[in-house]
Amino acid sequence: KLKIYLIGQAGASANEDETQALETEVKASEGTLREVRGHLDDAKQKVTSARGDQAIMTEAGEVASEIIDLERRLAELREKSEQAGEQVDEVELNTTEAENTTAHREWKRRKKLCMEIL
């Protein structure tokens, strides 16, 4: 057996004007809600972009400091080399530069692959 209870709706009659007013209010509220959600999505995108920009600026600062350190180290090594009287021939220099360029290209390729994964 199953019993179903219904609430009497005899005294709760709503007129057409109230119903239409409520429907227009609901539609207006839905439109406002969509607009607010759109603004929220825009704000989220801006925050995400700002975080990315901040990370890029931090990385750029680190790279700049690394460049300064490497230039200082290069100057020290050149000074030591001149003091020791060591000479580097052109073939050895070109070979070393080619190896460095190849290693740098490989590093860039690996970095790109890692960034695609992330």
Image (cartoon, grey):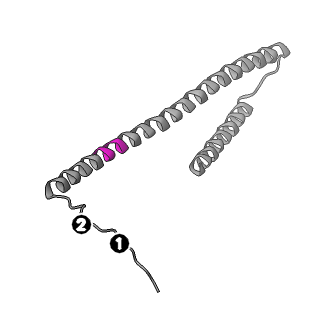
Residue that protrudes farthest toward the left in the picture: 17
Magenta span includes 37: yes
Taking the image as shown, residue 1 lies to the left or right of residue 79, namely left
Give the residue at x 63% y 27%: 63
Residue type (three-letter) at the residue carrying disc 1: Leu
Give the residue at x 71% y 20%: 69
Which of the pair 3/16 is nearer the observer?
3
Residue 106 position, x and y percent, is: 65, 45
Residue 117 position, x and y percent, is: 60, 51
Residue 81 position, x and y percent, is: 80, 18
Taking the image as shown, residue 117 lies to the left or right of residue 77, namely left
Task: Note whether 28 is above or below 52 in the view shown.
Answer: below
Residue that protrudes farthest toward the right in the picture: 84
Taking the image as shown, residue 45 lies to the left or right of residue 38, namely right
Q: Main secondary structure of the magenta part?
A: helix
Magenta span includes 11: no
Q: Quadrant of residue 58?
A: top right
Which of the pair 71/13 is nearer the observer?
13
Residue 65 position, x and y percent, is: 66, 21
Q: Secondary structure at mark 1?
A: loop
Bounds of the magenta segment: 32-38
* Mark 2 crowd level (few <14, some 14–19, many ≥20, 10 Å Cα): few
Q: Secondary structure at mark 2?
A: loop
Q: Which mark is residue 70?
A: none
* Mark 1 crowd level (few <14, some 14–19, many ≥20, 10 Å Cα): few
Task: Note whether 3 is above or below 24 in the view shown.
Answer: below
Taking the image as shown, residue 24 lies to the left or right of residue 66, namely left
Residue type (three-letter) at the residue carrying disc 2: Ala
Give the residue at x 83% y 13%: 83
Q: Quadrant of residue 100?
A: top right
Q: Which mark is residue 6?
A: 1
The residue where tag 2 is placed is: 10
